[in-house]
Amino acid sequence: MKNLIYIAGITFKEIMRNRLLNVLLLFAIISIASTRFFTIFAPSEEMKIIQDTALGMIRFIGMLITVFICGSLLPREAERRTTVTVLSKPVRRTQFFLGKFAGSLYAIFLSLGLMALILYILVFFKYGHLDTADSAEAFFIAANLAKALFMIVMELVVIGSIAIAVSTFTSEIFSVTFGILVFIIGHLANYLQHISDRMELLPLKVVTLLVYYILPHLENFNVQNAIVLGQEVSLFYIFKAASYGLLYTAVMLILGSLLFSEKEF
């Protein structure tokens, strides 16, 4: 465990020095902060615009940060030959792999935390000076936003586990590209079942269903529309989605760890 925590800490420090991460994070913070000015086009829908735009930006930029971090770590380590140096010490390959993923999560969570902070500041400036009734509404919005942000975190954890698992046997470019494609197709996974129902050829039907069950159903984590419309998202639904995400992540990490253990350097 000591080795895993040490590797995670070193990985986190390396990631935070990454210029691409800093550029994406700065762009996200500026974009979220600027949503306040979009409300001039529809003053009555001010909070809906802020929530919808900010959550969409957090999900998209968070996805880019996740795939670039998790998809590039292991290939870059292999390219610099630092993997061989670390593994020559009493460090298990599983510890190295999981330590890299844990360090990635530290950086991803910090990035999401900064973006979420800007969003909550916007909510505070909208409701912070108002009466008790509006304060109650602000509390409801803040609680709902916490649910949406948690679901985004779970989605990114799943995507990150896939990206780092794939990176154990592919190049950095392929891993990053694959992670972005998984994000896009994962939100369309539910349509594959409808497509398979209309197929007449059995082989195509089987392949489509197989892809449907293998792909992560990322739309399960998307509660953005419900949050923006002020609808209640039950804790039971969040628990089910989080359980699915953790299970999928565990499977991908086990697979990635096994592939990394067999990899030659």
Image (tube, rainbow, N blue to C red):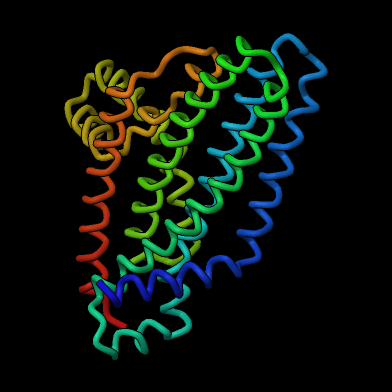
Q: Is residue 55 left or right of residue 19?
A: left
Q: Residue at x 80, y 27 (%)?
A: 37
Q: Is residue 264 left or right of residue 85?
A: left
Is residue 174 shown to the viewer in this render? Answer: no
Q: Residue at x 44, y 61 (%)?
A: 104
Q: Is residue 86 above or below residue 226?
A: below
Q: Residue at x 39, y 69 (%)?
A: 8
Q: Quadrant where the C terminus lies?
A: bottom left
Q: Position of residue 139 (x, y in %)?
A: 54, 22
Tell me where residue 105 sits by quadrant. Answer: bottom left
Q: Is residue 155 left or right of residue 1?
A: right
Q: Is residue 140 above or below residue 256?
A: above
Q: Residue at x 30, y 36 (%)?
A: 242
Q: Position of residue 205 (x, y in %)?
A: 22, 27
Tell me where residue 240 sits by quadrant. Answer: top left
Q: Is residue 190 above or below residue 21?
A: above
